[in-house]
Amino acid sequence: MKLSQHLFLECDYSKEVHTFFFSPIHLSPPPLIMDVLGWIKAPTRDSNINLILKLTFQASIYMLWKERNSRMHNQSSRPAVSLIQEIQHLLRAKMDILSRDQRNLPTTATFLSTWRRLYTSS
């Protein structure tokens, strides 16, 4: 558990990734991985933001693990900003697909419009 705690939440690299995605919403994940797993279920009252944060957290964990493997097995690394850009690209595509499913719902904000409101100025 200590390795995952450090890798996913405590090291400066992962903190930079999480800060990028959580700071526009003025949130920060709890410091312990087990607490994050409970907290991420409903960190806000906005259902669009909640889903975006869940997907963002999942994508971040996956991409941090891939980066770790690349460093260990290929001796290659990249800056956190590069990882953030890849996560943004991945999630924008997902928000587009989810927003298309929302077209027939009586909602004013789609996932993609919420994503853009939160992250296009970042």
Image: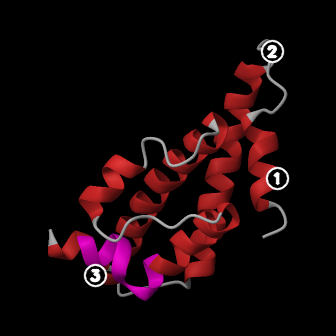
Rendered residue at 79%/22% (across/down): 107
Start-end of magenta stretch: 5-14
Nearest to the observer: residue 38 or residue 85: 38
Dot 1 corresponds to which residue?
Answer: 117
Q: Is residue 39 left or right of residue 98?
A: left
Circle nearer the viewer, 2 or 3: 2
- The first of marks 3 and 1 along the sequence is 3
Residue 7 lies in the magenta stretch: yes
At horizontal 44% and vertical 76% (from top left) the residue drawn is 14
Q: Residues within 10 Å of mark 2 (few under 14, many from 20)?
A: few
On the image, the x and y values in percent for residue 44 come to 57, 46
Amino acid carrying label 2: it is: Pro
Q: Give the position of the C terminus as an image quadrant.
A: bottom right
Return the residue at label 3. Answer: 72
SS for dot 1: helix
Task: Specify which label sits upstream in the sequence, 2 or 3.
Answer: 3
User: Which quarter of the figure has residue 17?
Assistant: bottom right
Label 3 is placed on what type of residue?
A: Met
Q: Residue furthest left?
A: 1
- Look at the image and name its color scheme: secondary structure
Residue 22 lies, in percent from the top left, at 59, 64
Q: Quadrant of residue 120?
A: bottom right
| Front label number (3 vs 1) | 1
Q: Earlier in the sequence, mark 1 or mark 2?
A: 2
Mark 1–mark 2 contact, CB under 8 Å? no
Q: Residue 102: where, in percent of width, then height?
A: 74, 21
Q: Position of residue 89 (x, y in %)?
A: 68, 56
For disc 2, the marked residue is 106
